[in-house]
Amino acid sequence: MLVTLKSPDCADSVASRLQALGLWTEKLRGGGGTRALYVRSDSASVELARVEAIDGVAAVWLPPDSHPLLDRLAGHAVVAGGAAIGHGHPPILVAGPCSVESPEQIDAAARACKRAGASLLRGGAFKPRTSPYSFSGHGAEALGWLRQAADAAGLGVVTEVLSEREVEAVAEKADLLQIGSRNMHAFALLRAAGRAKKPVLLKRGMAATIEEWLLAAEHLLVAGAAGVIFCERGLRSFDPATRNLLDLGAVALLAGVHRLPVIVDPSHAAGRRDLIAPLARAAIAAGAHGLMVESHPDPARAQSDGPQALDEDALVGLAARCSIHREQEVRP
Ligand code: PEP
Ligand code: MN
C-alpha cells in the first residue's frame, strides 16, 4: 500500500498514526521531502477508510490484486461433502487412512470416522510415493471402495488427484479433490482439477511461500474450481526429529487475516502418532477450520504411513479433545 501525503510536514505524524494501527512504513523521499509512505507487506490488515481518515493523508493506493478471485472468497465458507468449512463455522474433521487398501479396510475406517464425528472420509487411491518401489495405491478400483464406504457411513469423500489423466475419474467419486503437497506447483494439473468445477483441497507445497500457495489457488479458481480449502501440512525443515515443520503462523494468517478456509494436517507434519493430538489442538487454537488426520483400523498393518496413523479409539479421543462435533448437514 502507498499512502500519499498532503504535505511533507505530516510525514512523521501520519507514520506514527499508521504504526499505531499496526502498519509499518518506509518514507519515500522526493524533491522537497517525504511525499509518500510505503506500507510494508508484513503490516496488519486494516480497513482502507481508517487510513484515509488520518489527518494529513492525501490518498491511498493499493497494489494491483494478484489473486482477485481468491480474495472474493474471503469470509465465505466452502461447502464440500455436506460440510461447511471456513469462516464462521465450527471446525470439522477429515479422517481416514493414508491409502485405501481394501473394501474391508476402508469400510472399517469409515465407521470409525463416523463415530469420531468426521464430516469427510479421506484415503489415497492414487498415491504419490517418494520411492517408485513403494505401494502406490489401488487406483480407480479404490475410488469405488472409498465412495461406497463413505456413502454407507454418511460421509463426504476427499481423495488426491495425482495427474491430469485421473481428474475425471476422481471427480466422479469425490466431493473434494485433493492436490498433494508435491503437486502444488503443477500448474497444468491445477488447471485440469479446476475444470472439474468441484471444490479443491490444496495442500501447501513443502517449500512453498504463502503467496505461491495463494496463487496456486488462483490457478484453480481461474479454471473454474467451486472453491478452495487450504491445507497446511508442514514444511521441509533442517530437523528430521519431526517429519515436517508445522507452520501455524500461516494458519493464523490465512484464517484470521485473509479469512480464507484453512485446515491442518498434523499427521504429515508430525510423522508420528504421539504428536498428533498436541499439534491438532494447537492448530484449532491458531484458527484452523478443521483437521485432516490419518487413521487406520489396524495401524501396525498399514501399507503406508502406519507410524502416524491413529486407531479408532485414538481418533475418537482426538476429536473429543479438539471439541469436534459434526455440524448439521449443509446442502451445496
Ligand atoms: C496425503 O494427504 O495423502 C499426502 C500424500 O499428503 P502430502 O501431499 O501433504 O504429503
Ligand atoms: Mn500419508
Image (spheres, rainbow, N blue to C red):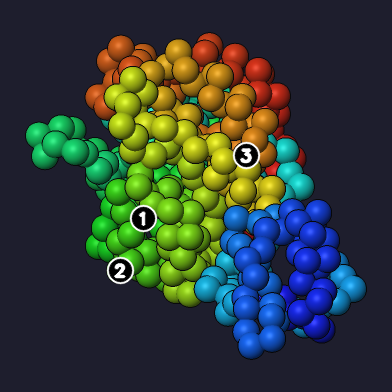
Which image quadrant for residue 24? bottom right
Mark earlier in primary sequence (3, 1): 1
| Ligand 1 within 8 Å, label 1 CB | no
Amino acid type, residue under disc 3 in the picture? Ala
The reply to whether dot 2 and dot 3 touch (C-beta < 8 Å) is no
Residue depicted at x 64% and y 35%: 286
Amino acid type, residue under disc 2 in the picture? Ala
Q: Judge from the rendering whether residue 184 lies leftward or rightward of residue 9; answer left or right.
A: left
Residue depicted at x 29% and y 24%: 240
CA–CA distance between discs 2 and 3? 29 Å
Q: Residues within 10 Å of mark 2 (few under 14, many from 20)?
A: some
Residue matched to label 1:
184
Residue matched to label 3:
288
Q: Residue 66, relative to residue 291: is it above or below? A: below
Mark earlier in primary sequence (2, 3): 2
Q: Position of residue 293 (x, y in %)?
A: 48, 29
Which image quadrant for residue 274? top left
